Amino acid sequence: MKVLVIGGGGREHAVCKKLAESKDVDEILCAPGNAGIAQIARCIPDVKATDMDGIVALAKREAVDFVCVTPDDPLALGCVDTLEAAGIPAFGPSAKAAQMEASKVFSKNLMKKYGIPTARSEVFDDMDAALAYLEKEKAPIVVKADGLALGKGVVVAATIEEAKQAVVDMMENGRFGKSGARVLIEECMVGPEVTVLCFCDGKTIVPMRSSQDHKRVFDGNRGPNTGGMGAFAPSPLYTTEIAERTEREILVPTLQAMNAEGIEFKGVLYVGLMLTENGPKVVEYNARFGDPETQAILPLLESDLLSIMRAVREQRLADEEIRWKDGAAACIVLASGGYPGKYEGGKLISGLEEAQKRGAFVYHAGTKKTEEGFVTAGGRVLGVTASGEDLEKAIENAYDAAKCIHFEGAHMRTDIGRV
Ligand code: AMP
Ligand code: GLY
């Protein structure tokens, strides 16, 4: 089969790599792709992930058999609906189902209505009402923009003043554009965070290996939030007992709630959990694979990813056997100096082959190929993933390999999997 993957980050590199191992995959196309993905797939840099017409035209021109839509924007724009309407089989939720991520108000209302454990929360369309509400609340408190905001529309405010500033930024100053016209003000939950990605076909929900990511830029979870500085799987915090409780209290009720609302969710449901002293609670849903969690999870998947994706689309997930490897995997992100603030691109990268020789796989997130070799071309540049018989060993292997890689200003956290 000829498969087209939409997107161009480290996560898409991991999806392409896993699909390339599939017995039924003859060729992989990736739009737009990136310089690393180009080593295993044919990239189409001119077709951006949000270019619906371009994607459909590409799929038709190339007679693609199956499309995997990975990033949030095209999903929210109805990429899967558009492809399916054009007769092209596609993996991922419909625009309606992708609201689980695209609207925090939507998913919050769903959780409220069906009693799914999450933070207490109020929705505001009016800034004065939001500010008046804050007068009566206590810090810490969380302010969130309703819509997609590149993962940056959440402020965990240490004081009421800071929370008010966040409300004004979102609702008056338009910091997140339309996404911030509506805000949620939420109780601040406390506890470690675990990500559970699930395959879901609208009838059955099957969790993958659990994982954790590290959002802050510096060691010890300090500094500003990023797209993710590293991840590992499985999470030792996600014990069998917590997994069973999550399945019973959150995963199955979420599937039932979506069905009761007439939403058939087919794709990957990302469940962000906080393990509070009162049990696991939902921090957020996403409607897709996580980045960089995917770079740590998919290497542990033993089964055929294309076969699972087809089973999801055709609602045969209950009959699909999904096997996982023993052991653990860790992904260390190498970022440009200055990220998530200003940074320079075009720095020559060395040591990529050395890292792979040590048994790691290097996923590309922001690189460019030049005559001299790969150079940096993004905030997050590479994700170095290694496996091991346990988490300790996986982390050690991943750092062994990551340390081989150099470019001017390179930054990585040294405590992935350890905090
Ligand atoms: P979100 O985009 O909703 O995942 O939020 C980004 C991050 O903000 C989460 O990973 C949490 O670390 C934090 N966060 C979001 N909501 C809450 C909450 N109600 N209480 C505490 N932290 C939160
Ligand atoms: N790792 C967070 C996300 O993918 O949204």
Image (spheres, grey):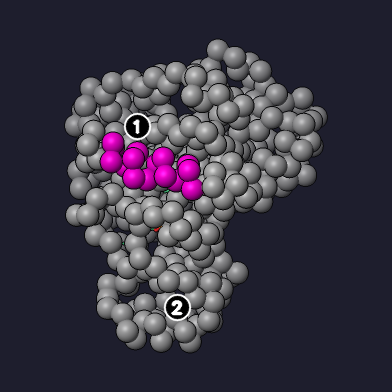
What span is in magenta?
243-257
Mark sitting on residue 209 = 1
Residue placed most toward the observer, 230 or 191:
191
Q: Position of residue 317 (x, y in %)?
A: 51, 25
Classify residue 162 by image quadrant.
bottom left
Query: Secondary structure of the magenta portion, mostly?
Result: helix
Q: Is residue 146 visible?
A: yes
Placement of 305 over or under 72, stated as above or below: above
Residue placed most toward the observer, 419 or 366:
419
Which numbered disc, 2 or 1, marks the residue that appears first in the sequence? 2
Count of numbered tags: 2
Rounded to the nearest angstrom, the CA distance separating label 2 from label 1 is 36 Å
Circles 2 and 1 in contact, beta carbons < 8 Å: no
Residue carrying label 2 = 167
Q: Please tell me how crowded label 1 is: few (under 14), some (14-19), or many (20+) other residues with Cα within 10 Å.
A: many
Placement of 233 over or under 227, stated as above or below: above
Q: Where, quadrant-wise, is the N terminus in this rendering?
A: top right
Q: Position of residue 64 (x, y in %)?
A: 72, 26
At mark 1, the secondary structure is loop
Q: Report the amino acid beneath label 1.
A: Arg
Classify residue 188 by image quadrant.
bottom left
Q: Does the segment drawn in magenta span residue 249?
A: yes
* Beta carbon at label 1 within 8 Å of ligand 2: no
The answer to whether 260 appears left or right of 396 in the picture is: right
The answer to whether 165 appears left or right of 392 in the picture is: right
At mark 2, the secondary structure is helix
Q: Report the amino acid beneath label 2.
A: Val
Placement of 161 over or under 39, stated as above or below: below
The residue lying at 19 percent from left, 32 percent from top is 392
The residue lying at 44 percent from left, 54 percent from top is 114
Q: Position of residue 289 (x, y in %)?
A: 48, 40
Q: Please tell me how crowded label 2 is: few (under 14), some (14-19), or many (20+) other residues with Cα within 10 Å.
A: many
